[in-house]
Amino acid sequence: MPSAPLYFDYAATTPVDDRVIETMLACLGSQANFGNPASSGHAFGQAARNAVEQARQQVADRVGAQAEAVVWTSGATESNNLALKGIAQGVLQGVMQPGHLITSQLEHKAVLDTVAELERQGWAVTRLAPDAAGLIQPAAVQAALRADTRLVSLMAVNNELGTITDFAAIGERVRAHGALLHVDAAQAVGKLAIDLNAMAVDLMSFSAHKAYGPKGIGALYVGPRARPLMRAQMHGGGHEQGLRSGTLATHQIAGMGSAFALAGQPGDSEHQRLAQLARRLREGLLALPGVTLNGCASQRIPHTLNLCIDSKGFNSAALASELALSTTSACNSASNAASHVLLALGLNEHQARNSVRLSIGRFSTEADVNKALEVFGRVLATASAALW
Ligand SMILES: *Cc1c(COP(=O)(O)O)cnc(C)c1O
């Protein structure tokens, strides 16, 4: 891409790491591991099955889960659908009547639209509003629990804001109540410590392409308390313990395993490098007139910044031509609506439309950050000059 803008949109998707590409290529082509993982009767199938199971172990190890609790899907959207619809259906088969679900106004559309569909089918839904800091607090979840609450669905890291939900504490309360907790962790891998063996989380959604793996592959963790209630939403050959049929995409799966094995940990040197870069970016941008941070300032991953630019002549298109940042969540951009997340935080329509998200990652450099500070400074100076 000649004269492409600098990339500041890692929260929308990440490039595939070269080491992941190597792993994927080893599963394509006539001389490679191309067999059908379900063809257990010959060596081609067995080799492919081995690659799939190794990747399953890599994903499980990364999040402290048992390998058999990891179900392959096409991405976090499908994982969220399977988690919510699969459990809702299992509950119905047991008690023959819909119950109550809790989620929040800050969730990804893959959760909100799925919950809306369940609501049409008769489920009662509570959509929690964030507190003054922009967070969903454990006490708010606790207060919303009802006798018939079956499932709570909240995200680990907000894709638009970068803020963190204390899902471990929420899980304790949800479990004590006898309900299940689903966590959309698409934005969390490599950025937050996740140890499912130690956390009261029953279902967790993952996506490869937010963590330097390929698009079109994800996984759902189905813990032991969720497993008996889970019903398949995709029927066919009974793959994935009957939970999700379809020939397994060996190259995608191997890529996701490799990406998760390479994913960092909070506190490691790469995390520190990015935290330092992000701090410079954040401090430099917040020093510009009219720029404020959206979402809680402290309980957040450093990589993602959402900024409101309250300057009358400001036009985010001028920024986007030089910096590939998000002027609206990629997931909402089809509808061109103001961000439901920013509106839920209390921003007005104008403020929500004048907000941008910058997110950095593995291939971000100090030069990129310097350039972003320069571009923002120039564009905002032009915007305020235009008022005179
Ligand atoms: C990207 C994202 C999704 C959707 O994931 P896909 O793998 O692209 O379907 C869901 N939830 C969150 C929080 C995301 O950031």
Image (spheres, rainbow, N blue to C red):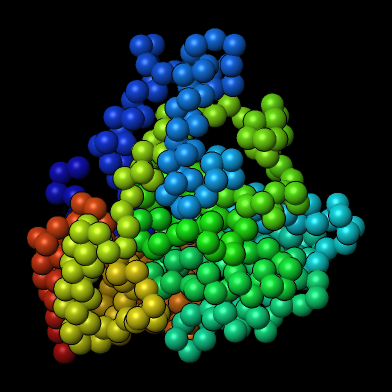
Residue 25 placement (x, y as % from top left): 33, 25
**Residue 91, quarter of picture:** bottom right
Relative vertical location of residue 82 with respect to residue 165 in this rendering, above or below: above
- Residue visible at 34% across and 82% down? 297
Quadrant where the C terminus sits is bottom left
- Residue visible at 71% across and 59% down? 117
Q: Residue furthest right?
A: 96
Relative vertical location of residue 136 with respect to residue 268 in this rendering, above or below: below
**Residue 199, quarter of picture:** bottom right
Relative vertical location of residue 271 with respect to residue 251 in this rendering, above or below: below
Q: Is residue 195 at least partly visible in the picture? A: yes
Residue 87 placement (x, y as % from top left): 72, 54
Residue 230 placement (x, y as % from top left): 72, 49
Residue 40 placement (x, y as % from top left): 59, 16
Q: Could you say which is closer to the camera, residue 205 or residue 47?
A: 47
- Residue visible at 83% across and 63% down? 98
Q: Is residue 85 at least partly visible in the picture? A: no
Quadrant where the N terminus sits is top left
- Residue visible at 50% across and 32% down? 53
Would you say 173 lies left or right of 22 here?
A: right
- Image mark count: 0
